[in-house]
Amino acid sequence: MMNLADALAHHVRARPDRPAIVQGERVVLYRDLNGIVCRGAAHLAALGIGEGDVVGIALRDSIDHLLALYMAARRGAVALPLDWRWTAAEQQAVAERFGARLVLVEPDGASLAGLGCVPVDAAFHDAVARAPADMDFPSRGDAPLLLSLSSGTTGRPKGPVVTHQQFLRRFWTHWIDMGLNARETYVSATPMYFGGGRTFTMSLLFSGGTVVLFPPPYKAPELAAEIARRGATSAFLVPTLLRRLLDLSDAEAEPLRRMRLLLSSGAPLHPEERREIRRRLCPNFCEYYASTEGGGVSLLRPEDMDVHDDSVGRPVFGVEVGIFDDDMRPLPAGEVGRLGYRGPGVATGFHEDPEATREVFRDGWFFPGDLASVNEAGYVFLKGRKKDMIIRGGINIYPLEIEAALQAHRAVVEAAVVGWPSRDMGEEVAAFVVLREPAGEEELRAACARRLAPYKLPRAIVVVDEMPKNAAGKIVKAALAARLQPL
């Protein structure tokens, strides 16, 4: 049981001249990293932060953001990531909801009424440089590390409490299942406010690898050029970014093909997309199914895609997956039900929210809200979100199947399927698509008919210029459904 920041002292001796964090021309070496983090933790203490206090982090995707996460960890404080893109009102509501003692903000960041906002500016860095590096810091692995928001700023945000030890066990899956290690040069190309972007960067620093920060916005050729410039061996991207990379020429995509690991998470890709990514971008492509509350669930490796290309892989090390009906009875292999999983990296509840905790944490299992089946060989097959399931004339229809059929068409870049309220059938199927080239509705419906039963075919297929998405890049289906008038 250890504080995650304990590992940094080892790297000072073991790999002092190796770059720990790189962004543009700025480089932090491992010989310096532990001292910066310890002095930063001491400065937090001087600002009144004690063990267990909540520290808001509303910083851009920068070296300072990553350092702040480890400074809070070293102090024994609880990090509360706040998206710097939010309005002041949004930041204020979340910071107050979780009782933040102070919030680290950009030099030009928002001022939050009644909350101590500390700009991370030249004065902050000077204060850190003057702070002592030899304070006694806590090393309890069972202490809370992070409140990782699992919903947006609408409604009542939920913050699963993740301890140092639970985060460390999530790192285990990175090492055991993906082979991430101290020799890695990893490109962080997604926002650190979100689970994957944050977890992989912290994991690489814990293990002694090099983290290259290259946050959005960027164009696909720029990311490929940065991968080439740094000799990157691994990267994590969300599906939206991977789809943009597929527009690269073969010459532009060459640096990606040399990587040891290209990883996707955040939303499931469709089989045709996976094949195209392996063929055009990186043969060593894996898809990682995970959640904010529980960390990794399953991993689909390249060799698995050849056998079960519609699966999200098999459970990662230490994770047990079960499929249950609504009464919490286990279902046999092949049947569709509520997916639950448990393991040493899974949070056990939400911060001061017993009602929300009871909804999704039951008898040691966490239920992320997905419908799925598991076959006899242990492969997990997602069917979509339970709340997104369409019931047409009493028959369950899973949107993922229809989205996959649409995206198999050469003209479709993205597809999203929602339920359409109907007086006669309860719900009909409505599809929204983004196209890369013209394609008529009947042509797209015919493509679906070659792969789907008639009752699953969309009643309407609507072409849109772009999908409404949240800050994590996930399609907001509620915004699409709101465009439909009941039949």
Image (cartoon, rainbow, N blue to C red):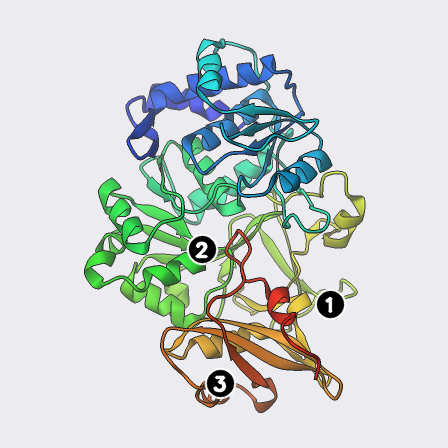
Q: Which mark is drawn over residue 124?
A: none
Task: Give the CA distance from mark 3 to mark 1.
Answer: 29 Å
Front tag of 3 and 1: 3
The amino acid type found where label 1 is placed reads: Asp
Question: Who comes first in sequence, dot 1 or dot 2?
Answer: 2
- Residue at x-position 47% and y-position 15%: 128
Give the image location of residue 372, x and y in percent: 61, 67
Task: Give the CA distance from mark 2 to mark 3.
Answer: 25 Å
Quadrant showing the N terminus: top right
Discs 1, 2 touching: Cβ within 8 Å: no
Give the image location of residue 141, x and y in percent: 60, 28
Question: Who comes first in sequence, dot 2 or dot 3?
Answer: 2
- Residue at x-position 32% and y-position 55%: 220
The amino acid type found where label 2 is placed reads: Val
**Which picture quadrant has residue 456?**
bottom right
Question: Height in image: 42 above or below 86?
Answer: above
Residue, far left:
251
Relative depth, front residue between 94 and 359: 94
Residue at numbered disc 1? 325
The amino acid type found where label 3 is placed reads: Cys
- Indicate left or right for 84 with 187 as reference: right
Q: Is residue 307 visible?
A: no
Q: Which mark is drawn over residue 448?
A: 3
